[in-house]
Image: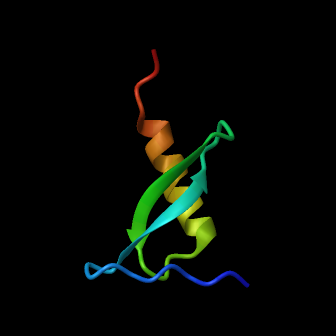
Amino acid sequence: MPDEPSPSPLGTVMREVTFPDRSRGIILVRAGTPQDEADAMAARVWEGLPRK
């Protein structure tokens, strides 16, 4: 199992996520947030983006 990134002093970590269109990105989440929850957060942000 990969090591969990060390939390920053603010209790956040960078997490690589997959958006619904299968693109990849990085978001900040609270330390200890499960990967599936981070991906769900990214999907909610992606859904809120304006479309051109």
Direction top: furthest residue? 52
- In the rendered image, residue 2, in percent from the top left (x then y), is placed at 68, 81
Residue at position x 49%, y 54% in the image? 26
Color encoding of the figure? rainbow
Residue at position x 56%, y 82% in the image? 4
Which residue is nearer to you in this view: 37 or 10? 10
- On screen, 43 above or below 2? above
Direction left: furthest residue? 10
- In the rendered image, residue 12, in percent from the top left (x then y), is placed at 36, 74
- On screen, 8 above or below 38? below
- In the rendered image, residue 23, in percent from the top left (x then y), is placed at 63, 40
- The mark total stands at 0
- On screen, 35 above or below 32? above
- Give the image quarter of residue 16: bottom right
- On screen, 15 above or below 30? above
Direction right: furthest residue? 1
> In which quadrant will I find the C terminus?
top left
Residue at position x 62%, y 84% in the image? 3
Residue at position x 44%, y 56% in the image? 27
> In which quadrant will I find the N terminus?
bottom right
Q: Is residue 23 left or right of residue 32?
A: right
- In the rendered image, residue 43, in percent from the top left (x then y), is placed at 54, 48
Which residue is nearer to you in this view: 19 or 9? 9
Q: Is residue 38 left or right of residue 14?
A: right
